[in-house]
Every structure is written in structure tokens, then in C-alpha cells.
Amino acid sequence: MTSDDAAGGPMRANVVGLGLIGGSIALGLRSHGWHVSGDDVVDGRAAEAVRRGVVDQAGIDADADITFVAVPVLAAVDAVQHALKATTGVVTDVGSVKGAVGTGVDDERFVGGHPMAGSELEGLDGADASMFNGAVWVLTPTPATSHVTLSMVTKAVRLLGAEMVAMTPARHDEMVAVVSHVPHLTAASLMGVAADGAEEHAALLRLAAGGFRDMTRIASGHPDIWLDICEQNRPAIVSALDRLIDGLTDMREIVSTSDRDGLLGRLQRARAARSNLPSRISRPEQLAEVRIPIPDRLGAAAEIFTLAARESVNIASFEVVHLAESNTGVAVVLVDADAAVRYRDALASHGFRPAITPLS
């Protein structure tokens, strides 16, 4: 996406909520020549963002091409609905829980989003234009989301340097509970154990080695946001905590009974799984391009991602190519090459007409 729109002027964006993530989005877009307006419920914060050069002007630009809503998750539904009423462009949010906003907003101009990035710093002091470089940014379309909205937000996400991954809101909340929410709660719990011990043995925390520091680093994040996150994503978090507790209980039994073979097996399995965590994106030879004409029916664009999630197909990249002779488009999706045929068949069984092109 270039910094200029079709009329020749700069692309325009709103950022509602000028904290760490909102400020970083604003700085990132401005670094690419966008004109960014900013708004915040905290008195004086928008004016401060203007003074710091984070945004160009305070307030809401009704004609902005895209509005990013970066408010606490409990306030997201109301803020998104307000943004849709106040503007004519597309709207997305950045909350780490997607279920409520996915069911609470039914508009073709909206798609939920969640950048998997952050910092221990807070507010505008931590805002960084390069924060999303190489990060994963999840988009969670619903049947109401239009392919035009998906395309616009995807291009903006890429411009900010992130890798787009798409899935349903429910699937997002299940997965993020495991990879983000429960790790934070675990780090906080482990840090609590160490702190309790340190009250009796003052030297304990001075002995903390690299492994302990790495595992508990995320516990230094701002605690306030986690109250809302745990409230909104409670079922998925409780389920993931139950699985973790079961795993720790099994590990306790293995250690207490000196089950050396069992312990070695668990550690080897964990090491193998850790080494197989994906890097930012697969090599080109591991990908295939699936081109999918988007039927003119409600929810067709979202169904592309729903089917991918159902078939456990990772979407590494997505864009929409618009056809000049009609108002429809073709979704160009990059997936793992070994999953391309399975994905094509699932799409075909639901009335799509996909075609596969290997990249190697």
C-alpha cells in the first residue's frame, strides 16, 4: 500500500487510544507518509501525542481510510461501534481477546485484529514505529466482514512490517490463551514463588539466572490490562490453566518417583517441540499460492479463513486482487505447500473454485 490514495493525497488513518500499541501504530503509519489523527479518553493525551509528533492532529477524521481502535478489551465493542458511526472507512481493533467484539459488531467495514507485539514500557513513552516489524498480526473476520475490508487492513498490517495470520475469533481466543495469556499468568505465579522465598532468603533473587529471567520477563508488563483480559477470555484461559496444571501434576509425579525414563522423555519432547516453533515465515519453496475467486454472497471472505482453521491450514499471507470488470475479487492466499491440496478440496466442497500455484 502506498502512502497516497487514488486522489493523489496521503492515506489517512485514525488511532483511537494512544497508549503503547496505538502510539506505535500511529508512528509506523506516519513513517510511511500517512496522515494520522488521534483520539483518547484521557484528557490531554491526544494533545501530547501531537506535541511529540506521534499523530498529525487530535480528534477523529471522518474521512479516514482506516481507523485503528486501541482501547482496553472491555471498551472495544463500544469504541468500534462509535468509530463505525463517526467515519466512512474501514475499522479494526487491536485487542487480545476477539470473541466479544466478533459477536458484538456486525458490520462489513469491520474486522477484528490482534498484533502479537508489545513492550515492558508503557504508554507513549514506549511507542515505537518499528514495534511490529516481523511480528504476527492476527485478523479475525466474521461472515459480515467484506473482502474489501480484509484487503485494506491486511495491506496496512504489512506496511507496519507484520505478518498477517487469519482465523476465527473463537479459534484466536483458544490459541492466544495458550501462547500468551497463560504464559503471563504462569510467569506471575513463578515470580510470586520466588518473591515469597526471597523474604526468607534475601540472596535468592540475586541468584536468578538467565533461564529464570527469560521465563519471568513478561511478568513485568503492566498488570491493569490483565484484569480485563482474564475477564473476557475466562473460559479459554481456565481450560488452558487446567491443562497446564495437569501437566505439572504429571511432572511432579515423575520427579517424586525418580522416573528417569519418563523425565527424559518429557524433556526430549519439549525440546523437540521448542525447536520446531515456526520462524517468522516459511521459505518460499515451502509455500503454495491458492487463488480463490470470491463469490458474491454474505460471509464468503470470512469462510475462506474459517475453512483454513477447520483444516488446520496456516495462512501465511493474504491479499485481494480486484477485478476491473466487476465488483468482485480474487483472494490470493499463501499456505504451506503440503496443506494446499487439502485446503483446495475443502474450499471446493463449499462452492469455491480455487487454483493452486506452487512457488518453487
Image: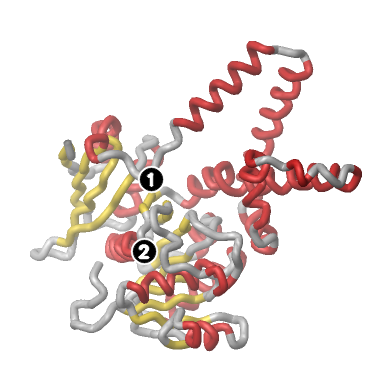
- In the picture as drawn, the residue positioned furthest to the left comes out as 325
Q: Is residue 303 left or right of residue 242?
A: left
Badge 2, how many Cα within 10 Å: few under 14, some, many 20+?
many
Q: Quadrant of residue 189?
A: top right
- What secondary structure is marked by label 1? loop
**How far from the left and from the top, in percent, is residue 128?**
47, 68
Q: Looking at numbered disc 2 in the image, what kind of residue is underneath it? A: Leu
Quarter holding the N terminus? Answer: bottom left
Q: Nearer the viewer, residue 287 or 301?
A: 287
Q: Quadrant of residue 348?
A: top left
Instruction: Please tell me which residue is depicted at 61% across the width and 65% down the height of the picture.
Output: 74
Q: CA distance from mark 1 to mark 2?
A: 15 Å
Q: Is residue 258 above or below residue 155?
A: above
**How far from the left and from the top, in percent, is residue 188?**
72, 48
Q: Is residue 143 above or below residue 46?
A: above
Coloring scheme used: secondary structure
In the rendered image, which residue does mark 1 sit on? 280
Q: Nearer the viewer, residue 64 or 280?
A: 280
Please say whether residue 269 is visible from this viewpoint: yes
Q: Quadrant of residue 100?
A: bottom right
In the rendered image, which residue does mark 2 sit on? 160
Sequence-earlier tag: 1 or 2: 2
Quarter holding the C terminus? Answer: top left
